[in-house]
Amino acid sequence: MHGEAQLEPPAEHPADEIRRLQRCINDLVSVLALPAIWTGSEPSQIVSTLLDALLGMLHLDLVYVRLKDPVGEGPIEMVRCALTLKLALKLTTRPQEIGEVLDHWLGDDPQKWPPLVRNAIGGEDISIVPLRLGLQGEIGVIVAGSQRTDFPGQTERLLLSVAANQASIGLQEARLLSQQKRVASELDQRVAQRTRDLAAANEELRKEIAERRLAEERLRREERELKRSEAFLAEGQHLSRTGSFSWQVATGEITWSEQLYRIFEFEQDAPVTIERIGTRVHPEDLPLVIDMIDRARGASRDFEFEHRLQMPDHSVKYLHLVAHGIRDHDGRLEYIGAIQDVTQRRFAEEALGKARSELAHVARVTSLGALTASIAHELNQPLQGIITNAGTCLRMLAADPPNVEGARETARRTIRDGNRASEVVTRLRALFSKKDVTAESVDLNEATREVIALSLSKLQRSRVILRPELADDLPPVTGDRVQLQQVILNLFLNALDAMSGVDDRPRRLVIRTERDEGDRVRLAVQDAGVGFEPQGVDKLFEPFYTTKSGGMGIGLSVSRSIIESHHGRLWAAANDGPGATFSFSIPRVPARVTGAHSNRDIGTPAVSDTDAA
Ligand code: ADP
């Protein structure tokens, strides 16, 4: 049913022809003006105005437009229909349906479309002109239809093709515009997102700055507080004459508080080292300090000791040191401690000690005097009686005749008085050594520790290095705890006395407990003191033997009688090196704990308690 487009019939009158041409020019101008109207419009608006314009201008019965995909949202189809055709189509003017019918007539390929198709829609004859939008129809298609048999005339064809060209241009511009808009809107979105990101980053930064400011403020406050407490500490150290220190054993690094510089009278110009400290230590105490440092290096421990300093002006200071050893994560040893200048206290203590020992001396002399007086008095009476009775006895025997009965009586009285004198001596011995031994279980280690604790301040004052070597597995002994402690204390104090004049070597004191043969326990006190002549060793245990100006000479003899009452043995031995070792050994469980005394018991050889009778 394809047909050729008919040429327009020539006008009958030139005037008609002129009017027709004028209309044609007007229409052409209107079509050419369309792009100006479309500027900035959406493709659907463009199509809509194009359809209206063509329908009005060419009195068409059908105009259909399909745009392939103008804005990337799928094809757009639109249709305009004259009322008569609508009626013929029974009002079915849905663009998709009309589009399907047209596709069916025209085919898929726009290149092969005929310029004109005659066909019937709904029984009505209709001439159809398909026009491509874009060179290959890539934009879409316009289909114009009319029931007129002379459609399309020449000018109509011209108008349709110009309109199609204009529409192509308009739609391309619209597409460009919409692309531009899309790009612009994408850009806008990206700018907005970036702005939001920047704002968030900004906010984050602001927060961070605020937090940092707070942290700085806190740090400043803590610094102020630290400075304040440092000032307090310095003031406290100054007032108490106490300085603090730390010592990294591995590196030798020493940190000192200001007060320590003051105590040692060091300039704060150079770091403190062990060698520098050594230049201030009193030469007599140097061995003690070196020994302490050596032992501190060896193992982590706690220390407390005293030593002296000798200042450049030869004045002497007494220091009390307390240190605590700790190990860090890597096992490195560090000591933290405090040193107090106790010079004033030490002077006061020395004065007090001197006064106390003077007082003790006076008391001892006084009590010895009183004791002597009472002994003299007690002995005097029976002695007087003996002398008187012996004189009377002699007289009675010299009488003529001799009064034998009287002499016998006076001789009996003499014996009685002799016994009385002997009793006095016995009582005196009982006074020096307690006769009854209390039998209890005694841990000699513990008893020794108590004695050490009691003598600690004296040990420190005497600058003695004490080394207890107490056996872990020492079994308890049965005996009198107080008496045994008396013996230990006595050996202890004798050892200190023996070392009091020693200045050329450390005043080392070892106290050792151990198991002895035959289920016995042994305790030894070893000093580095003056020692004794081996040949005179027995003399030491004699009552009233002393080499000390204030000594009584009864300590060792009482000690020996106590140990013997425990069925044990007390003896002295000279050391290989300097000093002496005093030891005792006692059975763990004595067969029979009694108050028995050996012939070494207290009492002078001159006084014998054998019955005079
Ligand atoms: P005192 O201590 O009153 O002198 P002791 O009986 O305890 O009486 O000691 C007697 C003497 O034995 C002492 O004066 C001293 O000469 C000597 N002596 C005691 N212990 C030791 C010792 N550890 N080293 C050297 N001599 C000692």
Image: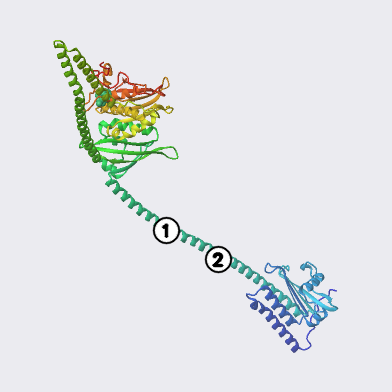
Whether disc 1's CB lies below 8 Å from ligand 1 is answered: no
Quadrant assignment, res 194: bottom right
User: Visible in this render: residue 95?
Assistant: yes
Give the residue drawn at x 37%, y 39%.
324
Mark-to-mark CA distance, 1 and 2: 33 Å
Q: Earlier in the sequence, mark 1 or mark 2?
A: 2
Residue 327 in the image: above or below residue 414: below
Specify the quadrant of the image occupied by residue 168: bottom right
Q: Residue 263: x percent and y percent?
A: 26, 41
Q: Residue at label 1?
A: 214
Q: Depth check: 140 or 484 in front? A: 484
- Which amino acid type is marked by label 2? Ala
Disc number at residue 192? 2
Q: Which amino acid does label 1 sit on?
A: Leu
**Image location of residue 247, percent across then percent down:** 36, 39
Left or right: 500 in relation to 453: left
Q: Is the C terminus in the top left, top right, bottom left or bottom right quadrant?
A: top left
Helix, strand or loop at label 2? It is: helix
Residue 204, horizontal then vertical, whole percent: 49, 60
* Residue 530 visible to an observer of this rendering: no
